[in-house]
Image (cartoon, rainbow, N blue to C red):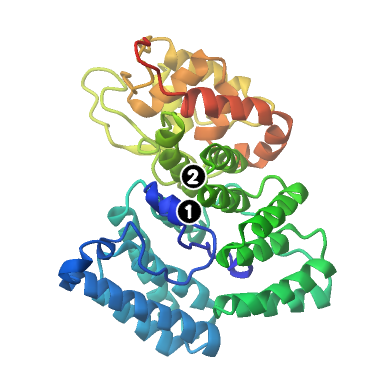
């Protein structure tokens, strides 16, 4: 739900046929899908595990309906807990519980209950990453964990800004109908909201989303495009439009929207996972490395962390696996005996201060690794060094080493150098797959 900042996830049949667990239209549970085990083997009857998933999906649907229609937090919580107990290893059900509890947080009166909900949310999101790795579900889970912990670097666009009381009222009515599953009824309220607030991109996105949920792809595309004309850097709107093209089978158009989504926000893990999944179907390789830069953790003004690779500081190094501020590690890898107290934090347009450090690190990188990640400093730094060698040090810093000061300047850099960022992604992170006989 856009008003609450909760991600919208719904089935996309073409997406699922490609192995993509993604979609744009609501947090309500989906019906049987091609990627569910219960979609196979019907002739022999559903197995016990399949029946458990069916029951869990039904309970999750009841929980969402209970909250959306009655605002009964106690009963909704009991129902969604029963759903998870039925199918604790079903990623979608775990994500449903996390999303529902996020929406219910403001209504939980006691601090103890809120704390319990937050613990349950974190547990579920980590479970989704474990159960559905390398899927958009996992990316959504990582994005949610970052936002809930207050570590968001690029503010997520999606809050309605309209000042019209009539428009806000119509939008809230539309969202309530949407969340209750009354999609056709919601359309007229979205229309009235957009009429009262014609320049509000999130309202247009939500209206488009309702048409998408109804399978009205032409109208959904029209409204998503109108929303992007007002604000081209809405990461989620890009991914929702990607879903429209996937359902039509236009993989190249879907791929282009996924590229724009990660340029809009380089920390958008759902967007990166979308790219990962689409790449094989459009003749592309996926070379972006996430594992060497785990969760973003706040550390003063610099918030990006990386994991120190084995042997990075020479023979006898015993600090492999240690996680810390990327600039400190960069200085160490560049040969400094110890990081200075005033280790610089890059600030656009002073990216040259990063470039010098990165070039020093990359001087001893092996040439011709073919993008496979061979590096004496590990795959993450290998990715960075390929970017530096190709002349994309600023783009590498913004796309992979984003900290709070860089994030404050990134929108300006993105507006001025969108073509360079796009070229960097296309040439180094998701390059064309080599043809037969290529070196």
Q: Which residue is mark 1?
A: 143
Q: Secondary structure at mark 1?
A: helix
Q: Name the image quarter holding the C terminus.
A: top left
Question: Residue 321, percent across and down?
Answer: 28, 36
Question: Residue 151, percent across and down?
Answer: 52, 52
The correct choice, above or below, for 424 with respect to 390 in the image is below
The foreground one among 248 and 341 is 248
Q: Name the image quarter holding the N terminus.
A: bottom right
Corner quadrant of residue 86 = bottom left
* Front position among marks 2 and 1: 1
The correct choice, above or below, for 322 with respect to 329 in the image is below
Q: Secondary structure at mark 2?
A: loop
The correct choice, above or below, for 27 with respect to 408 in the image is below
Can residue 198 be seen? yes
Q: Residue at x 41, y 23 (%)?
A: 433
Corner quadrant of residue 368 = top left
């Amino acid at each position: 739900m856009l008003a609450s900042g909760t991600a919208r996830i719904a089935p996309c049949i073409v997406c699922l046929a490609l192995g993509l667990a993604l979609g744009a239209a609501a947090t309500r549970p989906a019906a049987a899908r091609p990627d569910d085990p219960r979609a196979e083997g019907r002739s022999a009857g559903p197995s016990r595990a399949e029946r458990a998933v069916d029951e869990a999906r039904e309970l999750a649907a009841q929980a969402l309906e209970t909250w959306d229609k009655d605002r009964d937090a106690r009963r909704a919580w009991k129902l969604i807990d029963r759903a998870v107990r039925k199918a604790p290893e079903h990623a979608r059900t775990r994500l449903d519980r996390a999303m529902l509890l996020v929406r219910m947080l403001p209504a939980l009166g006691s601090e103890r209950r809120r704390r319990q909900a937050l613990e349950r949310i974190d547990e579920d999101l980590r479970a989704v990453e474990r159960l559905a790795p390398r899927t958009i579900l996992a990316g959504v889970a990582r994005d949610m964990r970052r936002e809930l912990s207050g570590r968001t670097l690029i503010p997520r666009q999606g809050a309605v800004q309209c000042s019209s009381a009539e428009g806000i009222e119509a939008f809230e009515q539309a969202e309530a109908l949407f969340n209750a599953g009354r999609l056709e009824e919601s359309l007229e309220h979205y229309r009235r909201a957009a009429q009262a607030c014609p320049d509000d991109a999130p309202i247009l996105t939500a209206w488009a989303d309702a048409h998408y949920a109804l399978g009205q792809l032409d109208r959904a595309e029209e409204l998503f495009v109108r929303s992007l004309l007002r604000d081209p850097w809405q990461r989620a709107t890009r991914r929702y439009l990607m879903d429209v093209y996937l359902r039509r089978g236009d993989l190249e158009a879907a791929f282009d929207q996924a590229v724009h989504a990660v340029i809009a926000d380089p920390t958008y893990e759902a967007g990166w996972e979308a790219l990962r999944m689409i790449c094989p179907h459009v003749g592309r390789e996926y070379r972006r490395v996430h594992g060497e830069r785990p969760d973003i953790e706040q550390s003063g003004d610099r918030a990006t962390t990386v994991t120190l690779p084995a042997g990075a500081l020479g023979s006898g190094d015993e600090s492999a696996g240690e996680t810390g501020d990327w600039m400190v590690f960069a200085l160490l890898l560049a040969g400094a005996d110890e990081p200075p107290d005033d280790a610089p934090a890059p600030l656009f347009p002073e990216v040259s201060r990063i470039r010098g450090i990165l070039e020093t690190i990359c001087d001893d990188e092996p040439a011709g690794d073919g993008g496979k990640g061979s590096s004496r400093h590990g795959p993450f730094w290998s990715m960075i060094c390929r970017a530096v060698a190709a002349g994309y040090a600023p783009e590498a810093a913004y796309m992979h080493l984003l900290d709070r000061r860089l994030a404050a300047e990134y929108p300006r850099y993105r507006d001025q150098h969108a073509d360079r960022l796009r070229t960097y992604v296309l040439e180094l992170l998701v390059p064309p797959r080599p043809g037969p006989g290529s070196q």
